[in-house]
Image: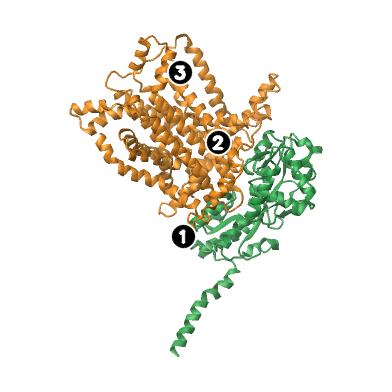
Amino acid sequence: MKKIAVLVAWMMLCAAPCALAAPQAKAAPVSADKAKAEGKVVFYANMTSVEPVMEAFQKKYGIRAEYTRLSTSKFIATILTEHAAGKLTADVLQAPVPVMELLKSKGIIASYVSPAAAGYPKWANKDGMIQSFGIEYVALIYNKDLVKAADVPRTYQELTDPKWKGKIVMADPATHPTTISWLVGLRENVIKSDAEWRAFLKGLAANNPMFVASFGPTPAPIETGEKLIGISMPKYIVTKAPAPLDWARVSQPMMGTPRAIGITAKAPHPNAARLFVDYWLSREAMKIMADQVGEYVLAPGVYPPIAGIDKARVIPIRELSDDEIKKWGAEFKKIFAK
Amino acid sequence: MQKTSAALTPGLIAIVGFLTLCPVVMLILGSFSGELGAFGAFTLDKYVAAYTDPAFAEILVSTVIFTLGSALVATGLALFLAYLNTRTNIPGKFMFGVISLIPMMVPHILFAVSWVLLLNPSNGMINLFLRQLGLEGAALNIYSLTGMILVEGLLDLPIAYLVIAPAMSAFDVALEESSRVCGASNARTLFRVTLPVLRPAILAALTLVIVRSLASFAVPSVIGMPGRIYVLATHIYSIVATGYAADYGMAAAVGMSALAASITLIVLYRRLTREGEKYVTISSRGYRPSVIDLKGARYPLFAVVALISFVLIVLPILVLFYTSLVPYVMTPGAKAFAAMSWRHWVTVLKDPVSLLALKNSLFLGVGGATLGILLSFFVACVIVKVRTKASGLLESLSFLSFSFPGIVVGIGFMWFFVQTPLYSTIWALLIGYIATYLPYGLRPLTSAFVQIHSHLEESSRVCGGGPLYTMRRIVLPLLVPGIASGWILMATMFVRELSLSVVLSRPGTEVLAVQILRFAEDGLWGRLSALGILMIFISTALVVIADGIAKRLSRRG
């Protein structure tokens, strides 16, 4: 009898955390007091220029928010290394969805559905762990001082017009994951026939675009007039104002890799982490990102201050696995070889 | 002296070995690991994949041309400038030291971007100017191997200059006088006597620049990639960048060929300078380098130097200053001048992270270079005075982390430091910097040590001077120019260090180069240039102070 009682007690003890954890995953608003008691929240992000959001959070809740920026190529390496050594200090992670998926498969992401994401599209959270909040949207960006209105492309395919020969800049399609995904996205969402898509690639290659390492260096040659147009990001119209940059209003949708956020499984400051995610996804924070950094965000009704963006269709690209990215990268390398 | 040095050897091998081997061992583990991290099941797959890549041969050829070319440009220019500065009566000497050092202080990305603004074939400022002169077809294209070599050679000029200049100034006049007494002209003396005697320094400079340009990433990415010219560093980048789960083990596998190349160079260098006695120039008799009177050539040569300095160094800096004032990167003209403001400067000076980065980088520059030069002093002493296998090992060890491409070595240090309590502290940066850039302290010091004959020390000992006394009164004063060079190289390097910092810096330990990179990634060239110029100011101040102290010390010696 005693033995059974002990057993039951044990079972209850073991079950208790699960029982408690389950409802917590979809918890009601986080207690700001508990979060405050934890003192700070540590945020590792792949995005740049998020300082205004960090500051607004600190001001609102009086909790210190530390921001470590990790570039995409070092993101997984750093987090896996710290995780393996038991030194992952991050409470909250932000990265493109494919990166978050990889970290999830290693058991690094915790379950959490923030009440602040209630109005977000359904696709933005499939598993109760990784929450997308924006799209790293890509567009044709051109120099509005040097390109006449009549010459601005109305479809992506117009980039293959010989008049753009030697006037295009883009990230290296053999190596830059976002550009690779974008080109593949064109095939799956925009140019439906494979032959037409390949003709587009060949035409683009024939125009001899200048390659740079990533999106970061794409706007500079356009603003100086070294090149006239590029496959780049509309957010630069905001961050580089008053540079003469504008985006081509093509009839097709804009595409990009979703940006996501999540809490780490062993977050040292779990309550502060939730509070931070709630704030990050709030309309207030999303508005800061849209206004100051030109981000395309998923909070309904919030748009970056770029003329015409509110009417554009922006869709997420399917998440390509690393093997697919490498395979397509190699293929693009051949197509774009001089 | 020899005995003390020999006794020092094992201890130094332990210290230097620990510093440089730890990250390299982690990288070797990673290159054989079946996982993404350093630890995993043993596999050769990464090597097979890396070295059976059909593009690899072409990349190697470009890499060899690029590194050798840069080394020749840098060393040639350094010889020319150092000779004029230390051995002739050319006017305006004060500017030589600073001008040949400026590229060391500029963030390499910025310097490369300035050159793109000047020389890109579409609307580079120099090309626009040439076109206005009516030279329509004469567009100079920076996006070529020649362009890469030119810019990398200039960026590495300070390394070569700081190795060669001390050797030039510690030159025994008797050798040249004998040559002239025998009827040789100045030019003949230069080519038959001066340059051959300087062989260790010249070879040291070449080795150092080859190894450095092998690891360099800024020029290959900013200038090579748009020209579709890939070298080892950009090839490694493409391995790491393609896909999200970057495989640094595979990158390390490719990096091993850079490591092998550097070790070969060190062995070659030691063989070529084996008969150390031949290069001793400061022995017991009158040592004071003579000054060659350039006579009528004084001002024409000065004009040449001034022109070189202007085109190669002042112009890009002016471009930087210009970019820091205009709201976005625009071609100069009435519109640009109307839009100029101090906006970017105000933003940077009000940014708490940029200010913290300034403070941290200053600390790392001064503290790191001082500790680094102390270590270099003992290591150089052993390398030169004890020419055993063990000292050869020590010399090779000192180059280990230095010869790895920057993208990879940072990860090696991360894999190592995460196992220690130093992870994410400023000490990790300090130790990593010293371990990686030890050759910057060592090279100028070894080439200075080589020139001091043991007769000098022996004379002191015969006269009753103890080893410490001999060191303080005889050796150290003669080494002052080498010490100053090494300190300057290390300090300016640490102030602008990027490869390690970008991996190891965390909130609270931000440094200048990382902050600059953030601006670069956001395309904020204005703020980038403003912070870059602040960085140049800091480095210039450090150089001027170090130079002043060195001058005072050697005068007293």
> Which residue corresponds to the image point at 24% horizontal and 36% vertical from the top-left?
B3
Are marks 1 and 3 in one subunit? no
> Which residue corresponds to the image point at 59% horizontal and 47% vertical from the top-left?
B241
Residue highlighted by disc 2: B63
Q: Amino acid at mark 3?
A: Gly
The numbered mark at residue A86 is 1
Judging by colour alone, the chain drawn in orange in this rendered image is B
Residue under mark 3: which chain is it in?
A: B
Q: Amino acid at mark 1?
A: Gly
Spatial CA span between label 1 and label 2: 39 Å
| Viewport quadrant of the N terminus of chain B | top left
Rendered shade, chain A:
green
Q: Name the spot of residue A175 as percent of width and height, x first.
A: 63, 46
Rate crowding at label 3 as few (under 14), some (14 to 19) or many (20 or more) other CA atoms within 10 Å: few
> Which residue corresponds to the image point at 25% horizontal and 28% vertical from the top-left?
B457
**Residue B319 in the image: above or below residue B51:** above
Rate crowding at label 2 as few (under 14), some (14 to 19) or many (20 or more) other CA atoms within 10 Å: many
> Which residue corresponds to the image point at 67% horizontal and 33% vertical from the top-left?
A224
Q: Name the spot of residue B87 as percent of width and height, x first.
A: 40, 18
In this orientation, which residue lies closer to the viewer: B509 or B110?
A: B110
Spatial CA span between label 3 and label 2: 37 Å
In this orientation, which residue lies closer to the viewer: A90 or A269?
A: A90
